[in-house]
Image (spheres, helix red, strand yellow):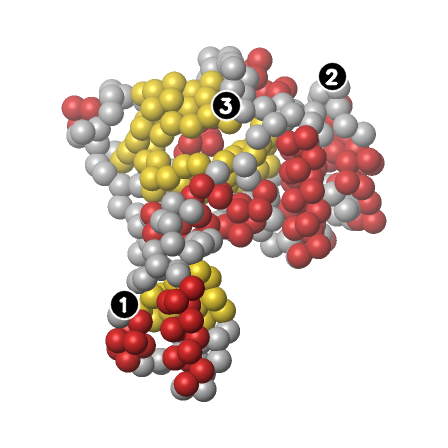
Amino acid sequence: MAAVEVDDLVVHRGEVTAVDGVSFLVERGQVLALLGPNGAGKTTTVETLEGLLVPHAGRVRVLGLDPVTQHAELMPGLGVMPQQGGVYPGARPIEMLELLAAFHAVAEDPAGLLERVGLSHRARAPWRTLSGGEQQRLSLALALVGRPEVVFLDEPTAGIDPSGRLLVRQLVADLRTAGLAVVITTHDLEEAEKISDCVVIIDQGRVVASGTPVELMRSAGSVEIRFGAPPGLDTAALGKTLMAGVDEVAPGEYVVETPATPSNINALTSWLAVHDLPLTDLRAGRQTLEDVFLRMTTITGEIPTVRRVDASDRSGGRAR
């Protein structure tokens, strides 16, 4: 039995379908990154798994339990890290951890947990005086103090400096090793690429891609070359040399629509050398997770449009 099961989940928010047929599994000892643009349905999906929302269709189970009807039974096994808030401004980290630990039959040692998240030196500092990154670390500690079996982490590295990101990454790896199931929602695609075993990308309430980070990054094969060079290259002339389309997708960032063969790479670098132009970056035959994300989702700078639910379907069925 998987630790988290989502099967054809449908959730409406008012008159819109926020989640439309999402399915995925998270096994024990696995880290899943749930990715998507703002408004894609990530938060709605996680809140349903936490028992805060009732599904209109489909099935969800966490540790084999229904998050709504068996909420009280499930809660001791869950650890939840919200992106912001949840702590009284004057509370001290050690006090908050000791308070939450007292609610659990078995709990982590508060002082030891503070040390693990790098906050021992701030144990008695009021929450409002902590930096944004320190507040994030405390939120992570609060999610773990009850020794949960499933952990939901919302933007765990937001506002955290590079050393702090390494610390969080190690903590997540430790949770995996300990056999916990971890679900992360994040916009830090580089971080998701590094720490997740599986990635699910949703857009407009639907799953548009899923698999391991390596599988997704290989999904397009070697059909393009991406490189960095000074802005404003003569893409038409370069395209004629390479016999392929060349686009400047951002200032100084280029995509060549041709396989990343040695001869094509040689032709590109030779053209730049002839024109005395530097090559600042080269990615051939391999996309990043960000490349996959941008290719698979609707990025318009706005919250993606969600489909309206017919009035006749508001009883909980799937919108058609």
Q: Residues within 10 Å of mark 2 (few under 14, many from 20)?
A: few
Q: Earlier in the sequence, mark 1 or mark 3?
A: 3
- Residue drawn 51% across and 19% down? 2
Compare residues 15 and 115 and report the one nearer the observer. Answer: 115
Q: Is residue 249 visible?
A: no
Report the amino acid beneath label 1. Ala
Image position of 204 with respect to 274: above or below: above
Q: Where 302 sits versus 82, above or below? A: below
Residue at which label 3 appears: 4
Query: Which x, y percent locates residue 70?
Result: 51, 13
Nearer mark to the viewer, of 1 and 2:
1
| Label 3 Cα neighbours within 10 Å, binned few <14 / some 14-19 / many ≥20 | many
Q: Is residue 228 visible?
A: yes
Position of residue 233 measured from the top left corner of the image (x, y, whole percent): 35, 80
Q: Which residue is mark 1?
A: 244
Cα–Cα span, label 1 and label 3: 45 Å
Q: Is residue 99 left or right of residue 156?
A: right
Vertical comparison of 290 with 34: above or below: below
As drawn, the label of residue 105 is 2
CA distance separating discs 2 and 3: 23 Å
